[in-house]
Image (cartoon, grey):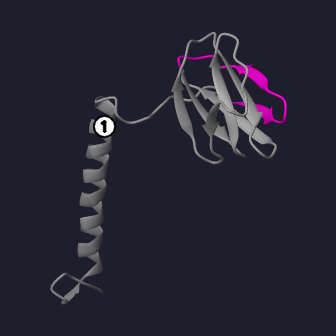
Amino acid sequence: MLEDRAGGPRPLSSHAANLGAERTTVFNYLTKLYELGALPVIRPGTTQQVAIGATAVSATAGSQVVRLLATSDCHIAIGAAPTATATGLFLPADTPEYFACNTTDLVSVIQDTAAGSLYITPAV
């Protein structure tokens, strides 16, 4: 048994019913955010893995929206012929970010202090 807010015992079945209501509320909220275009949700395409190193490398974005996730701190550039530099846009490790781009754009990446991988996932 669990205790309710008044301090009295409450059967577990009552707790389970409240969880169902809370899940419904969260689902409704997330659905509304999606409908408003305020929730970064994509249908993922094929993810590319690019090695992050001391020299800038590029890969095709392949979509108008891409999700980028790096395993180490890095700097990126997005465009027709970008070259990432140490003073470019910083992308912290383990923090997915979403970017708008042209389907023909390239994503360029260079390490901040350590090598790693950049995962580029296009929205399809």
Q: Is residue 108 above or below residue 92?
A: above
Please name the residue shown 72% across and 46% down the image: 72
Segment colored magenta: 47-64
Q: Is residue 52 magenta?
A: yes
- How many marks overall? 1
Q: Could you say which quadrant of the image residue 15 lies in?
A: bottom left
Q: Quadrant of the N terminus?
A: bottom left
21 or 34: nearer the eye?
Answer: 34
Left or right: 43 as drawn, with respect to 30: right
Q: Position of residue 84 (x, y in %)?
A: 72, 26
Reply yes or no: does residue 61 show up in magenta. Answer: yes
| Circle 1 crowding by C-alpha within 10 Å: few under 14, some 14–19, many from 20 | some
Q: Which residue is mark 1?
A: 33
Decide: is 71 above or below 102.
Answer: below
Q: Secondary structure at mark 1?
A: helix
With 61 as the anchor, is 113 left or right in this view? Answer: right
Q: Position of residue 6 (x, y in %)?
A: 15, 86
The structure residue drawn at horizontal position 54% and vertical position 24%, both measured from the top left corner, is: 123
